[in-house]
Image: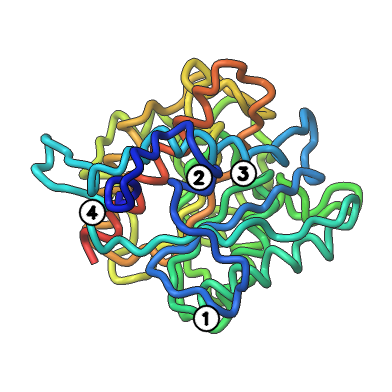
Amino acid sequence: MSHGYEDGRLNLPFVGISTFGKYPYVEDWSKIDADVAVMGAPYDFGTQWRPGARFGPRAVREASTLFAFGHGGVYDHEDDMTYLGAGTRIVDIGDADIVHTDTVQSHANIEKGVRAMRKAGALPVVIGGDHSVNIPCINAFEGHGDIHILQIDAHLDFVDERHGVRYGHGNPMRRAAEKPYVTGLSQFGIRNVSSTAKEGYDDARAMGSDILSVRQCRALGTAALLERIPEGTDIYLTIDIDGFDPSIAPGTGTPSHGGFYYYDVLELIAAVAKRQNIVGIDLVEVAPDYDPTGSTAILAAQLLLNTIGRILAFR
């Protein structure tokens, strides 16, 4: 990363304003000029149990400064490659405006931000917020062409409607599957107590979902998982932090034991990024107040930076 040194400042991670990765802040969404743009979506009114993911974007941004040492990129000795090196063009465009208790307007404001990033030709990266923020993110891809969704999550999130609720954090994958441009879903990590009843699983499979638990994913291995994801289609990546085990990611509203570990997910994402085009990312459900160690936010920031680094390297 290109922070510090050239202006005579050391600019350590704990110094300065906490934009994502300490990359430049762009307030005017009509002037986004970057390969990747990061936006916060601090909305958590879709939660069914513990709220707090509205503070996710701030926590992940602050955690991301840990990786902003200004060394001209991140050298990975296992890959023998430097990621996020000189010439990396990433910006932080701040947060979508959230109107408390107003789901429709809050979601519309998130969609507006994603559309602005797409119009600028930047890869949209959205930090939630609860998983319902995926709904406006996917809405913003109307007109893009076909996309396949790769979901990392403990919960299927395929509820159609419950007591009139259609846009909560248990609904996003159902709303996505209804889109004509969403050609299928790979739903990996699903386990234990779910947000979706059996009928929802039946509906998901009928609508093009491939559903695997963590144990099934590990038994198959990364190479076999990759082969289950349709080749030749653009990928939208949605990561619920509760897809990870609460031993490394306790800071979330609905933790579920038996989850993924870091390399389970990074190796799959890296393989997908090498093979096909990842066109959008959201990472959701970081609720930092449930994790006083900050480890959950660090995991989220580390995963996002490594994912972005690989996408840019393999383009």
Query: Who is closer to the viewer here, 16 or 259?
Result: 16
The answer to whether the residue labelled 1 contacts the one labelled 3, judged by CB atoms less than 8 Å apart, is no
Residue at label 3? 57
The residue carrying pointer 1 sits among few (fewer than 14), some (14 to 19) or many (20 or more) residues within 10 Å by Cα, namely few
Residue at label 2? 239
The residue carrying pointer 2 sits among few (fewer than 14), some (14 to 19) or many (20 or more) residues within 10 Å by Cα, namely many
The answer to whether the residue labelled 1 contacts the one labelled 4, judged by CB atoms less than 8 Å apart, is no
Q: For marks 1 and 4, give the CA distance.
A: 25 Å
Q: x and y percent of residue 279 in the render?
A: 42, 67
Q: Nearer the viewer, mark 4 or mark 2?
A: 4
Q: For marks 2 and 3, give the CA distance.
A: 14 Å
The three-letter amino acid code for the residue at tag 4 is: Gly
Q: Is residue 137 visible?
A: yes
Identify the disc placed on residue 119.
1
The three-letter amino acid code for the residue at tag 1 is: Lys
The answer to whether the residue labelled 4 contacts the one labelled 2, judged by CB atoms less than 8 Å apart, is no
Q: Give the secondary structure at mark 2.
A: strand
Residue found at x 30% / y 43%: 70
Q: Quadrant of residue 109?
A: bottom right
Mark 1 vs mark 4: which is more N-terminal? Answer: 4
Identify the disc placed on residue 85.
4
Q: For marks 3 and 4, give the CA distance.
A: 24 Å
